[in-house]
Each structure stands twice: as C-alpha cells, then as structure tokens.
Amino acid sequence: MNLSENRALSTAAPTAGRWGYGGHLYGLEPLALPATFLGRDTGDGPPYDPDDDPLASGALLPEFEPAMGADLVPSDEGELERLFWFRWITGHQTTFAVWQVLSAVLEEGKDPGADGDGLARAASCLVRTYSLMLLYASSTPQDMYERVIRDPMARQHPNLSGSWARDYAGVRPLIRGKVSLGSEAAAADLAFECDLNERIHKGIAARVVPSGVSLLLTPGVRQRTRELRRETLLWLYDGIFLTTRMPVSYTTVVRQLVRRIQAIHLDVSANGLYPARARNTAPEPAELSTDDVRELKASFISTLQELTDLVGAPACASRRAAQ
C-alpha cells in the first residue's frame, strides 16, 4: 500500500473520555481490507511511524474513567439512533477484520511445525470476539432495529444476506466444526467457542427478528438476488459496510482492527452492551439467556483487551525490529 493510500486510513488510537473516531460522536470510518486474507507477516507495510501506531504502546485499551465518559452517553433519540447505526456498521467492520486475522491463524496452523496450542488459543479469542461483535452490532431494541437497521438495509437490497460477506469464507470450516487446532484440550476449548458462536447467531436472529423472516427470505422479492452475479453481491455487501478492497498489509489490517476495538471499548464502557435509554421490552431469547452467554457478555472488555494483546504483540515486535 502506498503512502497516499495510507493517509486515507485512520489508525491513531481514540483516548478514554475523548471521542476521536469518525470525526464526530459515533461517526463512521472506511475500512480497507485485502481481497483475500494475508499471512501474519508485517514486511510490506508503510514506513513505521511510532507517533501514529496504536500497537506501539503496551496499554492498547486505555483505562476508562467513568466521569470522563459522560459525553459518550447519547442525550436524545437522534444520538441514540446514531449510536446503534455506529454499532451495526463498526461491529461488522470489526468482524471482517477479525475474520482476516483468524484466517491467517488457521493457515498458519497447517504448518506441521506450528505451535498448535498457541494458535488454538488465539483462534478461541478471535471466535469469542466475533461472538461479542454479533451481540454488539445487534444490541438494538426490536422496534428500533426495524427502523434504524433493517429498513435501511432493505433499501440497499431487499434480500441482503450475511452470506455475501467476502471474508467469512476462510473461517466457515472452523465455525462449522470441520477444522481443528492443537491438542485435544485446546481443540475442545476452540470447539466450544464455535458452538457458542452458532447459538448466539440463532439467538440474535430471534431477538431482533422474532418473525424469523430475514431479508433474504422476504416473500416476493427473492428472485431479484438471482439477477446479480455473485461478485456483484460481494461488492454490494462491502459497500454497505464502508469496506474497500485494496492491497493493504497485515499490519494495516491489525491497526484498523485495534482502532475499532478501542472505539467500541469506549462505547461499551460508557453505555454498557444494552444502553439504559434503549432497554429492550421483549425478553431475551433462550439462546441468549444461558450461563455461558451471560459469562461472555460479562467478559466484553477483558476479551477486547485479550484480543488487542494477541494481535498487537507480534506486530509490535516486528515493527520495532524494523526501526
């Protein structure tokens, strides 16, 4: 990626108590990802600039001061809707970047000399973060979900489907139990996270679309999907989530991931997973009410910290070695 492309991407870290993401409170930023996943190398990135590197600090998630977070709490209905739109778009972007890193981990696991247990632990953390992003992006109450999320998505395409997500192809075999990593114990832990992810996916569908009728299955409009080529649908899906494909380095993917994680950390620290101003009146589906899902929700911030440590450490070491 050349320098002009690098300047178009924001990679500086937001700081606790001050919102520096998207140009305004709960604004959005474009995401740049490669067309396919990259290995966990960092040799082809832009020149190292420690003043603009969120990976250069050991404290990748700053300590949150509650008194400093008052400005991050939506003050009216308009700000609340913007918050949930931010969560929908940025939660999906974070998921795409997580899939990129997870695909690289799985590819590395094919090497007979690889640290299988270490890679399995990394994969478990990445899948757990993916599960949290499902909860985060879909934290909107049912009535607001229809108005703020589902209707705008349907305007883009009446059959919009997550199956058009380009980056999921590399992780689908793992989530569906067709890939294993590490020793029996490590593989079992990873399999548990994948099973939990599947259950959360089903629970979210029941939470936000209790009718069970997704956009893909909306009666009377499915034929329209068949009129477009597969590549067109992938491109359309990227565009909805402000994602551009270009030859960026693995380190640039990680820096964009960390920036989003830090912004999400500020949001959840200030507002919680379910903001008080927008309580869901419907009961949580059974799939989202189990002890393991409650434990996952409680681990939101600690899991984000674990992930930033995971992706930051190898990138940091490589960047510093290149100085």
Image: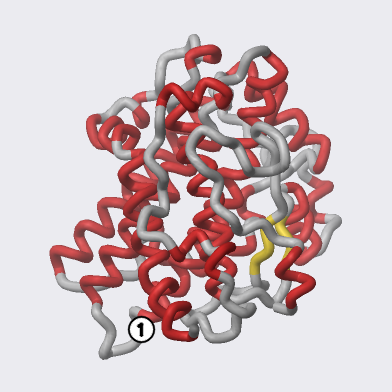
Considering depth in this image, is 58 or 106 the residue closer to the camera?
Answer: 58
**Colouring used for the render:** secondary structure
The answer to whether residue 80 is visible is: yes
Q: Is residue 72 above or below residue 30?
A: above
Position of 207 relative to 158 (above/below)? above
Q: Position of residue 24 (x, y in %)?
A: 71, 35
Q: Is residue 184 left or right of residue 57?
A: left
Height in image: 303 above or below 151? below
Residue type, numbered disc 1: Lys
Q: Is residue 40 visible?
A: no
Q: Residue furthest front?
A: 51
In the image, 288 versus 95, the foreground residue is 95
How many numbered tags mark residues here? 1
Find numbered disc 1 in the image and state the secondary structure of the residue it sits on.
loop
- Would you name the residue on which mark 1 appears? 110
Q: In the rendered view of the protein, which quadrant contains the N terminus?
A: bottom right
Where is residue 20? Give x, y as percent.
Answer: 62, 42
Q: Residue at 44% of width from left, 50% of height from top?
A: 130
Residue displayed at 41% across by 65% down: 312
Q: Is residue 238 left or right of residue 48?
A: right
- Residue at 30% x, 39% y: name it: 299
The quarter holding residue 176 reads: bottom left
In the rendered image of this protein, does residue 224 appear above or below residue 312?
above
Which of 260 and 178 lies nearest the eye of the viewer?
260
Q: Looking at the image, which residue is at 80% across and 55% down? A: 226
Relative placement, left or right, of 312 versus 147 is left
Residue 169: percent from left, percent from top: 55, 66
Residue found farthest to the top: 281
